[in-house]
Each structure stands twice: as structure tokens, then as C-alpha cells.
Amino acid sequence: MKILFVTIHFGEYINEIVREMKSNGNSVDIIYTDNYLINPAYFIYKITKGRFQKITDIEYQKRKFAKYKKENYDVIFTLVGRGIDEKLFGNFLRSQKKAYKVLYLWDDVKRISEFERIKNFYDKIYSFDPKDCERYGFTHFPLFYCNQFRYLLCEKDIDLSCIGGLHSDRYNVLCELKDQFKNYNVFFYLKTTFLHFLKILLDLRKKNISITHFKRLTLKKTAEITLKSNVMVDLPFESQTGLTIRTFEAMAAHTKLATTNADIINYDFYNPANIIIIDRNKAEIPKDFLKSQFQSIPLKIMEKYSIKSWVNTIISKEE
């Protein structure tokens, strides 16, 4: 098949999705709707309050949609949809009437300001968030794990880990856990912007500055840490019910999970021996949980959440 992939930047995960799409002989063209991230200029973004970003993004999209207008795509797959110029996209779609148009929401609808203007472009809308699916009539479809996270009988020599972006109350929760596990091998890594990092650095009250960084860990390093961890801490946005990608990476790595997302009990891989729900206002993890063994999950369920299964579902038109 011939696929057009319209996406925001999601680090190396985009490369993994494209690689999986191409693995079956498909051809893939890609358009980033947040093109400014290719050459980050965060200070310009802040000074212009996003206006510079919008101008450069629209000019990039205009060139790309014009370039691909004469192609005949079988599938047009949009990831999230944030940043899409609806006029440019709408005009482009009029030249692609035979294409199957599918949107996957890897974010809450309330954080996608363009959603109401683009939702009618699609034949199918999937979302990782069950509440949004119930509210808007989407098809619920959880995230995936990449092949790098598959368990390989490696030694679990990290007691507790957490890798992600610095947002909401993550920093405070991890500081509490770091105090609880002073004599344990703990790896906490919160990625932030350089300016935000400097702001934290100058705040003398931030006693655990070492857990914040302005460089993103590579997917390879993230997989390495996850595979070596006994327990992964998962701290999504408080309003979020959809499971994070860390959830599935931990499962693939045979790493137990301590999460604030109580909705996890509704999934077929949930096992209280492997997963505990913690309170973000008083984060506590029983020390016995760190040392207990991960209980295996049926292979059929494991494969259900692989990137291969995820991609195949996304690009397969439902009759």
C-alpha cells in the first residue's frame, strides 16, 4: 500500500512506526505538523508566543501537501492531529477521495485545539483514552511497545525507575519516592526544556535536581533501563484515563508497574502481582513488591500490544 503519515514529533517512536509500516512492503511519505521542532528554537517560540511556530509550520505543510497532491494514497494516517492547518489539509484531501483516512489520538481531546475542525475528515477515529471514546464515540485502541522492550532474560539490577517528561506533579511524587528508597538502586529521569531546567536549578528548594535533564534519553537507553528494572513508576496526567506507552513497555520487559492510573484494572493483562495502583498525593510502594517475581502473561495477550499488531490495525480498513 501507499501510505501518507501525518504526525507530530514523538521522538524515535515515529521512526519505529514507519519502519513497521514499511516491513510489509508498504511505501510511506511523512508530513510533520510541528515542523519547527526539526530545528528547535524554544526561545523564539516563547518570545513570539507561538506565532513564529505557526507561520513556519503552515509554510512547511503548504509545501508538503503540494508535493504529495498528485500521489494516489491508499491510507492517510494522522497521529494526534495537533498543528494541522485544516484548510490546507481539507484541500489536499479533495485530491485523495479513494484513500482510507484514519486518525489516532495519542492525547486527550481537550489538549488538541484543532480537533473539532478536523474530526470530519476521517473515516475512522481511534483513541487511547476510554473516557474520550465513551464521550465522542471513538474506537478504543491502546498503545503499543516497540521490539526493543521484549524481555531477554536480563538481570533486574535497578529497583525502581521512571522515565518521562517533566509535567504536572511528577517531580514532587518522584522526590517522595526517592526519600522512601534511599538505600535502593533508583533511576529517575525527567526530561524538560533547557530554560525550565535552568529555572529549577536556580530554585534552592529543589533538592533532587539530579532527576531533571534537558536531554531526552534514546529509545535504546530507555529500553535498557526498563529491561533492567524491577518496578517502573508510571505517572500520567491526573485527568488521563488512557494508558501510557510506558505501561506496555514495562509489560513487554517483564517489569512490574506502580501507576496512578486506576483504569488499568480494566485491561486483560492486569495482574495485581505485577501492577499496583498508587496515590499521587501520598505515593507509597511496598518494598516487598520490588523484590517479588514478575508473573508471566499469555503470549497471545503480549503480542496483541506489539507495535506490529498496532500498525496492522491502524492501516487496515474495516469493512
Image (spheres, rainbow, N blue to C red):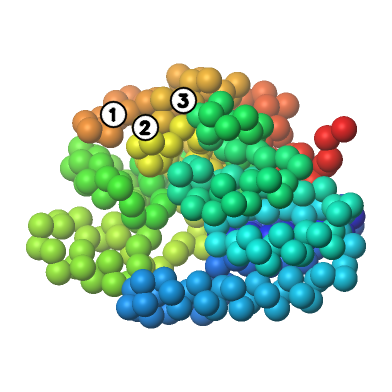
146 up-or-down from 141: above or below = below
| Separation (CA) of disc 3 from disc 1 | 13 Å
Cβ–Cβ under 8 Å for marks 2 and 1: yes
Question: Would you name the residue on which mark 1 appears?
Answer: 279
Viewed as shown, does residue 159 lie left or right of 140? left
Instruction: Name which residue lies at 84% across and 40% down.
Output: 317
Instruction: Name which residue lies at 51% across and 59% down.
Output: 221
| Image depth: mark 3 or mark 1 in front | 3
Of mark 3 and mark 1, the one earlier in the sequence is 3
The number of callouts visible is 3
- Residue 172 numbered tag: none
Question: Would you name the residue on which mark 2 appears?
Answer: 260
Query: Element under label 1?
Result: loop
Residue type at numbered disc 3:
Asp
Residue type at numbered disc 2:
Thr
Res. 250 visible in picture: no
Of mark 2 and mark 1, the one earlier in the sequence is 2
Question: Would you name the residue on which mark 3 appears?
Answer: 263
Residue type at numbered disc 1:
Asp
Viewed as shown, does residue 37 lie left or right of 77? left
Q: Is residue 207 or residue 116 the one in the foreground?
A: 116
Q: Residue furthest left?
A: 204
The quarter in which the N terminus is drawn is bottom right
Within the image, what quadrant is residue 136 found in?
A: top right
The quarter in which the C terminus is drawn is top right
